[in-house]
Amino acid sequence: MEQKSRQPKTSKDHRDARLKAALKANLARRKAQARARDGEKPQPEGAEKDKG
């Protein structure tokens, strides 16, 4: 059975992999910040969490 290499081969692939990792880290950091903000201030009475 052949195993696929997950290492980028070209410079464009290296760049794409680096950007993908940076975006993933940024998203995780922003989610953590949002969770921290939500925990700091209580929801006002009558405010709906899901307005959509």
Image (cartoon, grey):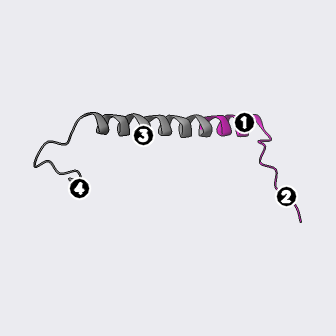
Q: In what quadrant of the picture does the C terminus appear?
A: bottom left
Q: Give the amino acid at mark 1.
A: His
Please give the residue where the numbered disc 1 appears in the rendered image.
Answer: 14
Residue 10's quadrant in the figure?
top right
Secondary structure under the numbered disc 3 in the rendered image: helix
Q: CA distance from mark 1 to mark 2?
A: 20 Å
Q: CA distance from mark 2 to mark 4?
A: 45 Å
Q: Give the amino acid at mark 3.
A: Lys
37 and 2: which is toward the camera: 37
Q: In what quadrant of the picture does the N terminus appear?
A: bottom right
Q: Are marks 2 and 4 in contact (CB under 8 Å)?
A: no
User: Which residues make up the magenta segment?
Assistant: 1-19
* Residue drawn at x 65%, y 39% as measured from the top left: 16
- Which of pointers 1 and 2 indicates the residue nearer the eye? 2
Q: Residue furthest bottom?
A: 1
- Which of pointers 3 and 2 indicates the residue nearer the eye? 3
Q: Which one is earlier in the sequence, the residue at label 4 or at label 3?
A: 3
Residue 33's quadrant in the figure?
top left
* Residue drawn at x 61%, y 38% as measured from the top left: 21
Q: Which one is earlier in the sequence, the residue at label 1 or at label 2?
A: 2
Secondary structure under the numbered disc 2 in the rendered image: loop
1 and 34: which is toward the camera: 34
Residue 34's quadrant in the figure?
top left
Secondary structure under the numbered disc 1 in the rendered image: helix
In the rendered structure, find residue 31 and report the number of the disc placed on it. 3
Q: CA distance from mark 1 to mark 4?
A: 39 Å
Q: Which one is earlier in the sequence, the residue at label 3 or at label 1?
A: 1
Q: CA distance from mark 3 to mark 2?
A: 34 Å
Q: Give the amino acid at mark 4.
A: Gly
Q: Is residue 12 magenta?
A: yes
Please give the residue where the numbered disc 2 appears in the rendered image.
Answer: 3
